[in-house]
Image: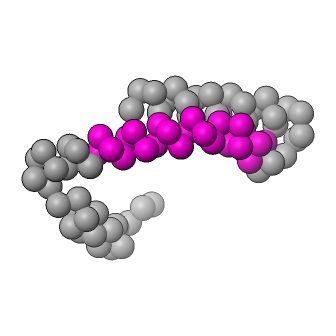
Amino acid sequence: MGELGAELKQVWAAQETHYKKVGNRREAQDRALQEHLPHLREELADCLAYLLKLASYTGIDLEEAYLEKMRTNVGRNWG
């Protein structure tokens, strides 16, 4: 998870650098993501693997937990 955080920090820094050059947040974000996509993809896959292993070790049905949480969120007041 720490490595994912470090990679995201690099993406955000690159986004700011691009923004100073192009003056458009969306374009700056797109450029930064394209530059970092291979590493970001790797780190997200690592996080998913750890999450699935943890769910397995603890006996948590991750699909059911997700569906339950989404049902809760539907009725949630976000304001």
Is 51 situated above or below 67?
Answer: above
Q: Which residues are magenta?
A: 28-51
Magenta stretch, main secondary structure, is helix
**In x, y percent, where is residue 21?**
89, 33
Q: Is residue 66 left or right of residue 56?
A: right
**Is residue 58 covered in magenta?**
no
**In x, y percent, where is residue 49?**
33, 44
The residue positioned 55% from the left and 30% from the top of the image is: 7
**In x, y percent, where is residue 18?**
81, 34
In the rendered image, which quarter contains the N terminus?
top left
Is 54 situated above or below 78?
Answer: above
Q: Which residue is nearer to you in this view: 20 or 11? A: 11
Q: Is residue 24 left or right of residue 29?
A: right
The residue positioned 74% from the left and 47% from the top of the image is: 30
Number of on-image labels: 0
Q: How is the image coloured?
A: one colour
Q: Is residue 58 left or right of residue 26?
A: left
Is 67 situated above or below 25?
Answer: below
Is 6 situated above or below 61?
Answer: above
Residue farthest to the right?
22
The residue positioned 60% from the left and 39% from the top of the image is: 38
Q: Is residue 25 in sight in this rendering?
A: no
Q: Is residue 15 in sight in this rendering?
A: yes
Residue farthest to the left?
59
In the rendered image, which quarter contains the C terminus?
bottom left
Q: Quadrant of residue 19?
A: top right
**In x, y percent, where is residue 23?**
88, 41
Q: Quadrant of residue 72?
A: bottom left
**Is residue 47 covered in magenta?**
yes
